[in-house]
């Protein structure tokens, strides 16, 4: 079962771990430019495809979260209950794909 991460832990992953991933990948790109290593070129390609996948997953997750919030707000409004915004849940849903990939890349690139 996958662990659930909070908005705060996802933001912390992006804040602290993303620069480590960027540094490791920048080094790999520099080495690829000097040596022509296929492995380093593969890392560059992986970086681009991961970003595209993360964007797509983030957009879908944000739209699903917005729809859920809208349904919840509509039900609360119909019941005459006070409503509060769910912007944190939408933000968390949108950031989760990026944070998940950053965590995985840190683990993989440390090796």
Image: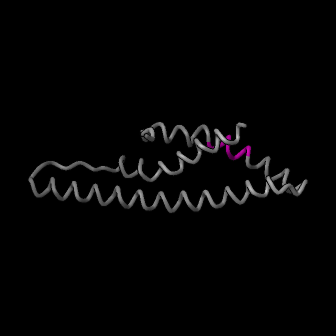
> Magenta span covers which residues?
18-24
Residue 19 colored magenta?
Answer: yes
Drawn side of residue 34 relative to residue 22, left or right: right
- Total tally of numbered discs in the picture: 0
Res. 33 image quadrant: bottom right
Quarter holding the N terminus is top left
Q: Check the image and name the residue furthest to the front.
A: 1
The residue sitting at 45% across, 53% down in the picture is 94
The residue sitting at 68% across, 57% down in the picture is 46
Res. 13 image quadrant: top right
Relative to 36, is 100 above or below?
above
Our reading of the magenta stretch's main secondary structure is helix
Q: Position of residue 39 (x, y in %)?
A: 80, 53
Q: What is the image's colouring?
A: one colour
Residue 38 colored magenta?
Answer: no
Relative to 58, is 101 above or below?
above
Q: Check the image and name the residue furthest to the right.
A: 35
Q: Position of residue 80 (x, y in %)?
A: 9, 53
In the image, 70 versus 31, the foreground residue is 31
Drawn side of residue 31 relative to residue 19, left or right: right
Quarter holding the C terminus is top right
Q: Check the image and name the residue furthest to the left.
A: 80
In the image, 74 versus 2, the foreground residue is 2
Q: Position of residue 70 (x, y in %)?
A: 26, 59
The residue sitting at 70% across, 37% down in the picture is 110
In the image, 37 versus 102, the foreground residue is 37
Drawn side of residue 9 relative to residue 83, left or right: right
Q: Position of residue 12 (x, y in %)?
A: 53, 37
The residue sitting at 75% across, 57% down in the picture is 42
């Amino acid at each position: 079962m996958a662990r659930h991460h909070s908005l705060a832990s996802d933001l912390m992953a992006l804040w602290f771990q993303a620069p480590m991933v960027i540094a490791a990948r920048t080094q790999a790109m520099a080495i690829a430019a000097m040596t022509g290593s296929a492995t380093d070129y593969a890392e560059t390609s992986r970086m681009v495809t991961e970003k595209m996948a993360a964007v797509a997953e983030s957009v879908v997750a944000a739209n699903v979260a917005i729809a859920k919030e809208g349904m919840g707000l509509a039900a609360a409004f119909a019941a005459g209950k006070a409503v509060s915004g769910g912007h944190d849940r939408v933000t968390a849903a949108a950031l989760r794909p990026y944070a998940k990939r950053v965590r995985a890349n840190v683990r993989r690139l440390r090796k």
